[in-house]
Image (cartoon, rainbow, N blue to C red):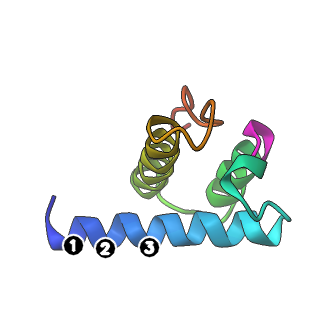
Amino acid sequence: LSRHSIEAYARDLRHFLRAMDEAGRRRPGDVERSDVLAWLEAMEASGLAPSSRARTLSAVRGFFRHLVREGRLEASPVRDLRPG
């Protein structure tokens, strides 16, 4: 990935984690599928472009996939979510 792409993914993940923290989901294991769906709906309602929403969801999926691989989570709340 290019430096620009890595920075964009990091920014997207920080945005997601901040939103989850504000929703009271302070640890990755606290995040539920319904939290992610509400977050995706909020991004759409804010007018974020579909390509940006897809990139953001990709960053979040990668984050949770990593946590599952490392044994820190049993399952990802975003495993089968696709941008809508």
Is residue 32 highlighted in magenta?
yes
How far apart marks 3 and 1 lie (CA) works out to 11 Å
Q: Secondary structure at mark 2?
A: helix
Can you identify the residue that label 2 sits on?
7
Q: Amino acid at mark 2?
A: Glu
User: In percent of the image, x 55 and y 26: which residue is there?
Assistant: 80
Are dots 3 and 2 in contact, CB under 8 Å?
yes
**Neighbourhood count class around disc 2 (C-alpha, 10 Å): few under 14, some 14–19, many 20 upward:** few
Q: Secondary structure at mark 1?
A: helix
Tell which of 80 and 82 is nearer to you.
80
How far apart marks 1 and 2 lie (CA) works out to 5 Å
Task: Please tell me the numbered disc located at residue 11.
Answer: 3
Total residue callouts? 3
**Neighbourhood count class around disc 3 (C-alpha, 10 Å): few under 14, some 14–19, many 20 upward:** some
**Neighbourhood count class around disc 1 (C-alpha, 10 Å): few under 14, some 14–19, many 20 upward:** few
Q: Tell me the magenta residue range.
A: 31-35
Are dots 1 and 2 in contact, CB under 8 Å?
yes
Q: Position of residue 12 (x, y in %)?
A: 47, 66
Q: Amino acid at mark 3?
A: Arg
Q: Is residue 1 left or right of residue 5?
A: left
How far apart marks 3 and 2 lie (CA) works out to 6 Å
Can you identify the residue that label 1 sits on?
4
User: In percent of the image, x 21 and y 73: which residue is there?
Assistant: 4
Q: Position of residue 26 (x, y in %)?
A: 76, 65
